[in-house]
Structures are given as C-alpha cells and as structure tokens.
Image (cartoon, rainbow, N blue to C red):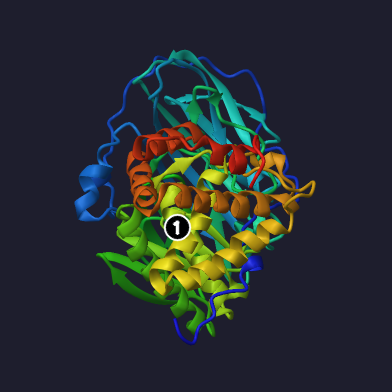
Amino acid sequence: MKGRNPFFLITGMILMLAGCSTPAPTISTSTPAALSTVHPMEVTTASQIFPNPLLDKFEEEGNSYPQATRYQLSWQVSPAESTLHGEESIQYTNTETVSLTDFYLRLFPNTSFMGGEMIVSDLTVNNIPVDAELRLENSALWFPLDPPLKPGETLSITLTYDVSIPTDNSAGYGELANMNGILSLSNTYAFVPVYDDQGWNVEVAPMIGDPVYADISFFQVDIQTDPQQQVVASGSCELLSRGHWGCAAGPVRDFIAVLSNKFEMETDQIDDITVQSSFLPGERAGGETALTTALAAVAIFNDLFGEYPFRELDVVETPNLASGIEYPGMVVLADRIYTDENVLEAVTVHEVAHQWWYNLVGNDQVDHPWLDEALAQYTTILYYEKRYGESVASELKEILLQSRYQTVRGTADDLPAGLPVRAYSERQYSPSVYARGGLYFDALRKEIGDAAFFDFLREYSSRHRYGIATPESFLDTLEDISGSRHENLYRQWITGEDTLP
C-alpha cells in the first residue's frame, strides 16, 4: 500500500462507553394483577414485514425463526423538544424448556449509562393492565406471570412511554443524545433480556463496555417526526409521507435510529448490499473514506466468515464520545475522527466486524466481552492483511495489540481477557479485552496454522449464526475443527490461570 500510513490508532480504537447521571423513578409499584391464560398469537414472519430488510436469498433463513420476539414500535419524535413518545407491542414466545413464572423488560434510557428518562404507562399483558415493579435502579420492570408461561406459549405485551433525551453526550458517550443537529435514539424502547440456564440476565448496566445482551428479534417501527429530518436506522426504511417513515429490521439484536436535518449521503453496493454513508456538511472526504472502507470490509468478511444477509449497512457520523459504536445494520462513528483518514478506516473496520461478532453471532457482552470485542479487534488486523498485505498488518498488530498490552503487562492492571466487564476499571478494560484478547487470537492462529484457523472462524460463525455463543461453545467449535481446545493458550490469555510466555 503506497502513500498511506494506517497507524497511530491506539486512541481511536479504544472503544468504551460510559455514563454519569441518575434517572428519576418511572412507574409506580404495586401488586401486579393476575393474568388470564396465555394463548398463542399469530406469528409475523420476516417476509411479511415491510420493507423487507433481508436480501432475497436469505428470506428463507430469516423465516426460520418464527418464535423470535417481535417488536412493533410507533414513535413520535420531536427534535425541538428532545422527546420521544412511544407505543410498543411485544410478542414473546417461551422457547425455554421450563415455564416462566415472572418477566422482565429493560428500560435502558433510565440508566446512568444512558442518562435519559423513560416514563412507562399503560402496561398490559394479554390485554390485562399490570402494575410492574421498578428494579435495577429503575432500568427494569418486573412482574409475575400467573399462570406461568409454559414452553411454546406466547405472551402479548403492550405499553406506552415517554422518553426525555439528553441534549449532550456526557452519558453513554452519546448513544442517546440530541446535539449538533443529530438525534441518536439507541435502545429507546422496552426490550426483553435473555433468559437462559441462569434465569433472566438482568443487571445494572456497567459504566464501560456494551450493555446489550439480547436474542435475535424482529422489529417493525413507525417513526413520525419533522419533515426536514432524515431517518437512518437499523434494517431498511422507507419514507411513507412527509415526516413519516416505516422501518423494519430482523433478525437482529436491537434497534437504533439516528435523525438529522443536516446529513449528506453517499451510497454504493457490494454483493447486492447497499452501503450508505451519512455525514455532516464539510466532511465529504471522511464520509467517502468511511463508505469505501465499509464496502471493502464487507467484501472481505463475507468471504472469510459467511455472508452478510441484510439489504443495507449504514455508516453514520454522530457526535459520540466513543470512536465508534456498533448496532445491527449500522455503525456510528465519532465526528472528531472524520478528519483523520487512518483512524477513521480502522474504527470503521472494527465496527463493521461487529456485524458478524455481535449481531450475527451473539454473546453475553456484559459477562464475556472478549468473545466479540477481542475477535472484532483481531478481525481488524485480518482486514488490513487481506487488503494491504502482511507487512502492513504486522505493523498494525504491533501498535494496536502488542504495544497497547505492554502498557499494563506485569502491572496490577494486567488482567486476563475473559473477565466480566464489571471486573475492569476503565484503565484496564481496553488493554485487557481488546489487546490481550486480540493477542490470544494471534497466538491461536500461530499454534493451529492458517488453514485450521480460518476454517475455525468460518465454522464458529456458521454454527452460531443468529444464536448465542459462549466460551464453552467457542472451545467446542475449536476442538471440532482443530482436534484440540488448546487450553494452554486459553488459560494464558483468557482466564489467566497460566503464566504468559
């Protein structure tokens, strides 16, 4: 690669989220009413959602999940007042092997991590009004199910809510914020957390890392806002009339929309996928770099890990304080990096990698962040290797992984990559999870060889597509492909049980 220097990226690639304010209580608590018997509901398949977010060749694949949770959202968004009024309908099917005796809904705008306020009213379960208990510092609603929801049965939940959106990016690095003419609406709805062998996965969102741990779901979202606003969202959107948008996404982990009356846009296609870059006036050079980078990354990752199944991928400039943040079908990039072509390319690649290692292959980002973050970081190295050659990738690996890890190695901040987010301080998180975790993948590649390593990544992606990967299933896949779990490396880099070489 002549004439380019894709390095000096350490600060640009330290991707962390944080928050600092405390929301007010949102709904009164009282004894929940008893529920009537739960009856199955008609299931809406992906092919019935308009517009269809999936490429034609993946429609059958998308329709293979009729029991995935369905969200119907209706939003009235006022950028001038920095508010959102929402009406929501959730169709949830119990896919577990046990009956569910209670239920949770997460309200992320109420967390210190997000810094907003979400006031819920008119909550019904199977058309019966329910008063739910606020828990987890007002970030969750809890209510019992009477009778319990048996395996295979379906629950219908409706609610209305009002969200006050912060007018700065001091919380959550601006995931939920209205500033500089850009309105970012991350997790602006009540969502169902994962239920697994440990029960409901609910906890107060950590102040760093990513807070979302979710099964795949389908979204149909009606957005009404000022006619001057352009809407960019997960999945596919159509302008139905002035100020009125219809969006659909799925199967995905969550949903985001970004609104602005300032955006300029450029689009291109790769493998029938439309990639759109939305950027602010005066940032066209950066917007075009983000576009060409995303196109190249999709082409490389399609070949390495399996095809991206959606019609669209959006790359959006926002005033967030994390260099980049991943969402299904969208990556947002900080406005401050649009003037640095090298940082912009690397951050774009990392976030596009999360379309595989977060959205298509899910994991518990709160308890096992290395599964997506360390792999996305090493995947960034693979992009540079495939696009620019081994010498460029080697130099980037030295700066992005080895040098970053050396800042803590042998100190009290030298922690294994496999801890929960809550175990790290902000100073420890990136060197441990991103750098040390990325070096694990590099060591694994050297130990098993390129052929087995890339076979493993493709099988891991295929086996967990639309599912949830765990450290155990990761090692199971590794053993199936390479003949060993290579636990020596895993203990050294991930769990820290053995001394590093």
Instruction: Mark yes or no: residue 396 visible.
Output: yes
Q: For residue 68, which quarter of the picture?
A: top left
Q: Is residue 138 left or right of residue 74?
A: right
The residue wearing badge 1 is 353
Residue 109 on image: x %, y %: 62, 47
* Quadrant for the N terminus in the image: bottom left
Q: Is residue 454 left or right of residue 175?
A: left
Q: Residue furthest top?
A: 147
Of 324 and 48, which appears nearest the observer?
324
Residue 273 on image: x %, y %: 29, 64
- In this view, 175 is above or below 463: below
The type of residue carrying mark 1 is Ala
- Name the secondary structure under disc 1: helix
Q: For residue 33, which quarter of the picture?
A: top right
Of 98 and 342, which appears nearest the observer?
342
Of 230 and 495, which appears nearest the observer?
495
- In this view, 303 is above or below 368: below
Numbered label tally: 1
- In this view, 125 is above or below 468: above
Instruction: Mark yes or no: residue 260 visible.
Output: no
